[in-house]
Image: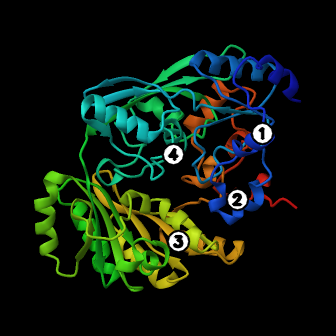
Amino acid sequence: MKPNVAAAKEALAHLDIEKSDSAIKAKSRDFFWYSPVLKTRLDHVTADFVVAPRSEAEVIEVLKICYAHDVPVTTRGAGTGNYGQAMPLEGGCVMHLHHMNAVKEVHPGRVIVEPGCLLKDLDAHCIAHSGQEIRMFSSTWATATIGGFIAGGSGGVGSCTWGSLRDLGNIIRLRVVTMEEEPRLLEFRGEELARVSHAYGTNGIITEIEMPLAPAYDWVELFVAFDDFTPAMEFAEELANEDGILIKLATVFEAPIAHEYFQRVKPHVEPGTHLVALMVAPHSMDGFDTFTARRPASKVIYRSDDNDWDRSPGRIFEYGWNHTTLRALKVDPSITYLQVRYGFPQHKELIEKMRAEFSPEVLQHLEVLRENGKVMFAGLSLVKFTSEDRLDEIVRLHEDAGAMIFNPHRYTLEEGGRQTVDDRQLRFKQEADPKGLLNPGKMISWDDPEWDYAAMYAYPKLQAVE
């Protein structure tokens, strides 16, 4: 197929089409540059044009016109993803959904919203109209969209209580448009949600979302300091296992992360301070104070409801998840990261083993995560990058030890996820995107039906640009 970009752009000229070359380039990029590997491969990638539909009907029009002219379409929200999910590898059209940002309905326990709504705006609307909030969100809450979170995210703030996005009940319903000669509108629930959630927009465009809500609280945000790493890790785990204490975040930072990379925290910690960041519901603070008093190794150095710092640290969740990497990058551009699953019940043993093997080259940043009712840890480890070969070796040694890596230095679904082909997503792409025009290059199994785990890291599109 040879795309006729000019014809598609002309047919869509009555819509909101970006005319500035610099803006087209900016809207063709996400946060892929967190990875020095992806920065080498993707820095040159740019769409031919950007269109911003204002309604589901306009989404259908864009997909129909681009299908007729064989033009690839890559959908994006705010572009805060770190895997290159929203990078238009084959050029063509970037469909920007920022206009589709309406909160349509709020009900007890659920909300119906368009995909371009910012997470912070969704929370604000739900709190104002019902006293409820979304269960979980990425640390890019202030800038990321709900559609981008579902299409490219896996969990975040709130996962210590509610688990991951893929867990049953954490997405109620998705409305999806296919890319065919005559695009179809489909609604997915239950088992069918896995066909399009965390699929990078490779097999359908999400135009409406129904998500569960929880009671909103004025969360008390805290930093708790420790002289040793193991008590800090155990503190976070044990707190998450206290059924009567409601939390929304429990994050562990190995020393010297807090001192080296958290500029507003630095005056209050030493280089050897290991830190735990928390969000605790106000009605649980009596329980939390009792819990802390029983653990003399812990020292609360900051709490948002009783702040005596000269300079506020800001929102605590903006130190966790991948904001940790962002803060480190601002101080040391050689820093990158890995995403690690430390599964129950070997989680602590594995963490200690990796720490003994790699620290300080790899520093432990842990997020408490609940999986199948068990508290475990997701690692967003900070890595001092020296070479791609060494990075690959660190990945291999983690995997050899039994720690699963969700590799943020690979932009395909298979390599950045569970290192396997998701047949549900592949089969739906065959049905919903017969020309393979949706976000091409992100699903290896579409381009290479013989691909399997043995081919990991060998996909041709991952070769460096000369």
Q: Which of the labelled discs sits on residue 222, or is there none?
A: none
Residue 241: % across, % down? 21, 60
Q: Residue at x 88, y 62 (%)?
A: 466
Mark closest to the chain's N terminus, 4 or 1? 1
Dot 4 amino acid type: Thr
> SS class of the residue under badge 4?
loop
- Please say whether residue 320 is visible from this viewpoint: no
Q: Residues within 10 Å of mark 1 (few under 14, many from 20)?
A: many
Residue 107: % across, % down? 28, 24
Q: With respect to residue 386, does 191 lie above or below?
A: above
Residue 346: % across, % down? 36, 69
Query: Is 162 on the left-hand or right-hand side of 437?
Result: left
Mark closest to the chain's N terminus, 4 or 3? 4
Q: Nearer the viewer, mark 4 or mark 3?
A: 4
Q: With respect to residue 331, does 405 lie above or below?
A: above
Q: CA distance from mark 3 to mark 1?
A: 31 Å
Q: CA distance from mark 4 to mark 3?
A: 23 Å
Dot 2 amino acid type: Leu
List the residue tagged with mark 3.
Answer: 382
List the residue tagged with mark 4.
Answer: 143
List the residue tagged with mark 2.
Answer: 38
List the residue tagged with mark 1.
Answer: 47
Residue 214: % across, % down? 26, 38
Q: CA distance from mark 3 to mark 2?
A: 16 Å
Q: CA distance from mark 4 to mark 1?
A: 22 Å
> SS class of the residue under badge 3?
strand
- Please say whether residue 40 is visible from this viewpoint: yes
Mark closest to the chain's N terminus, 3 or 1? 1
> SS class of the residue under badge 1?
loop
Q: CA distance from mark 2 to mark 1?
A: 17 Å
Dot 3 amino acid type: Leu
Q: With respect to residue 217, does 114 lie above or below?
A: above
